[in-house]
Image (spheres, rainbow, N blue to C red):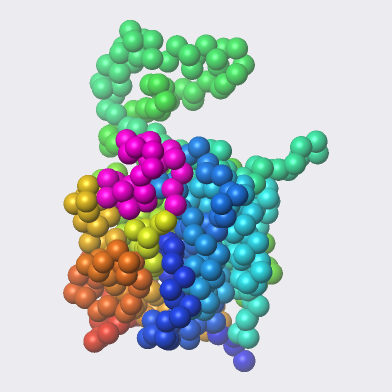
């Protein structure tokens, strides 16, 4: 008999409270629970008071108790966790180790972070009754100090995240290039870069590239930035997909990315599209992206789905109960201020920031059916995260059939050639229209 697989995915899980362990089952649990493989992206670490904060955070230092993370994973029945993202190192190596210990204790398959680059990059495998599922995870949004490093013959590797770096080149028309070249010469903006290259501490740019400080400029008939995946990182991740393709029945790739498409903030960055396509070409069955905290469209590429952003799944940001002193200093708050003070200041009493971005508080859960290699069905279940609820109850998902989600996801996916047909409470991707 041909094997089959049902796969459910969710976006960023920022969970700070252990309340789910005492809540009754929900319809959302049932939606996720029908799947053999159930994925979430954990964008918070389990860090005790012994864990010190990194000098740089992913935006806000994110940590929660072990109980809160355990309750969320158990409540929804997740058996796959990606955690290569910009918050994995918020509490340095202590937070990294504590989170890995927790996930290992729970028996959850997790990927994208490791003791060195090889461990962070390698596929991890879920054994299910309907087949073996491989998970590979990487992130394009991170600080350089958070990037995992390879082990060598003399020195151990560096713990961290599996990176997907990208290169940016800005295009200008030829006459603009000449003007910029003159400005660069007069301003000496490239002096340090050129001097270090002449001393062997750097490399000279390609002839077609004009450096301008940290930027790379080239002549182009279409002005604007162009982003491409870093070849070293892309090839490493492709190698992991190829390995997983030989060792598993199904391959899932999770990519965390905040970067925007420069001419369409609602669209995925060019390098992310290139990378996602390369993952499918290498043998991945599903590519799941997240990180933008808002929805992006669905593409069916070579008969396989790419979800360019699932937005948020849980967003209990307003319930974080501990921050490092740097956060209070950044907000110009006096010593002795509380987490509530910091959140009030950060959001100007909830008049700006996440509270006022409706897309942060709505998303969807896709459930994909495969029969053998063939994708046979994708159902779309809209979720609502309770934007208008009090802080103490905000950020927990529930099935929410709203016109806003339907319209937004339909329009974003249409630009990628994907049609969605909606019924009363869920949508279905029209696979019959895919060439």
Q: Is residue 20 left or right of residue 250?
A: left
Outermost residue toward the front in this view? 336
Q: Is residue 354 visible?
A: yes
Query: Which residue is painted at 34% across and 28% down in the image?
Result: 219
Front-lying residue, 19 or 100: 19
Q: Is residue 115 magenta?
A: no
Query: Which residue is painted at 32% across and 66% down in the image?
Result: 392
Q: Considering the image in quadrants, where does the N terminus appear? A: bottom right
Magenta-colored span: 322-346
Query: Which residue is painted at 40% across and 46% down in the image?
Result: 59
Query: Which residue is painted at 42% across and 56% down in the image?
Result: 321
Q: Position of residue 187 (x, y in %)?
A: 34, 10
Q: Please determine whether, in this image, residue 305 is positioned above or below residue 324.
A: below
Q: Position of residue 387 (x, y in %)?
A: 25, 66
Q: In the figure, residue 106 lies in which quadrant?
A: bottom right
Q: Is residue 310 visible?
A: no
Q: Position of residue 372 (x, y in %)?
A: 56, 82
Q: Is residue 155 left or right of residue 225?
A: right
Q: Position of residue 10 (x, y in %)?
A: 43, 69
């Amino acid at each position: 008999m041909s094997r089959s697989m049902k796969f459910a995915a969710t976006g960023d899980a920022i969970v700070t409270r252990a309340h789910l362990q005492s809540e009754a089952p929900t319809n959302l649990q049932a939606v996720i629970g029908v799947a053999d493989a159930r994925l979430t992206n954990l964008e918070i670490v389990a860090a005790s008071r012994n864990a010190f904060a990194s000098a740089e955070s992913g935006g806000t230092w994110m940590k929660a108790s072990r109980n809160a993370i355990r309750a969320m994973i158990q409540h929804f029945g997740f058996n796959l966790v990606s955690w290569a993202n910009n918050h994995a190192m918020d509490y340095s190596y202590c937070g990294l180790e504590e989170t890995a210990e927790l996930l290992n204790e729970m028996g959850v398959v997790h990927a994208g972070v490791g003791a060195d680059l090889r461990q962070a990059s390698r596929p991890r495998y879920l054994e299910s009754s309907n087949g073996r599922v491989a998970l590979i995870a990487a992130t394009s949004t991170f600080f350089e100090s958070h990037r995992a490093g390879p082990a060598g013959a003399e020195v151990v590797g560096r713990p961290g995240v599996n990176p997907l770096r990208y290169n940016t080149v800005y295009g200008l028309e030829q006459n603009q290039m000449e003007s910029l070249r003159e400005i660069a010469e007069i301003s000496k903006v490239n002096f340090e870069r050129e001097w270090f290259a002449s001393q062997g501490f750097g490399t000279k740019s390609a002839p077609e590239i004009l450096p301008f400080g940290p930027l790379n400029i080239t002549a182009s008939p279409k002005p604007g930035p162009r982003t491409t995946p870093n070849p070293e990182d892309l090839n490493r991740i492709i190698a992991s997909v190829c390995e997983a393709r030989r060792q598993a029945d199904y391959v899932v790739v999770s990519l965390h990315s905040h970067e925007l498409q420069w001419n369409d903030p609602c669209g995925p960055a060019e390098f992310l599209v290139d990378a996602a396509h390369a993952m499918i070409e290498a043998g991945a069955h599903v590519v799941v992206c997240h990180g933008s905290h808002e929805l992006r469209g669905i593409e069916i590429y070579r008969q396989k789905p790419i979800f360019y952003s699932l937005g948020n799944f849980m967003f209990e940001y307003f319930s974080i109960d501990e921050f490092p002193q740097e956060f209070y200093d950044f907000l110009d708050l006096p010593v002795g201020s509380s987490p509530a003070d910091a959140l009030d200041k950060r959001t100007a009493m909830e008049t700006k920031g996440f509270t006022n971005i409706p897309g942060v508080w709505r998303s969807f859960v896709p459930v994909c059916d495969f029969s053998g290699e063939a994708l046979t069905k994708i159902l779309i279940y809209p979720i609502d995260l309770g934007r208008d609820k009090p802080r103490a109850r905000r950020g927990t998902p529930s099935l929410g059939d709203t016109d806003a989600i339907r319209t937004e996801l339909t329009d974003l996916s249409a630009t990628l050639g994907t049609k969605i047909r909606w019924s009363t409470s869920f949508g279905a991707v029209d696979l019959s229209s895919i060439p």
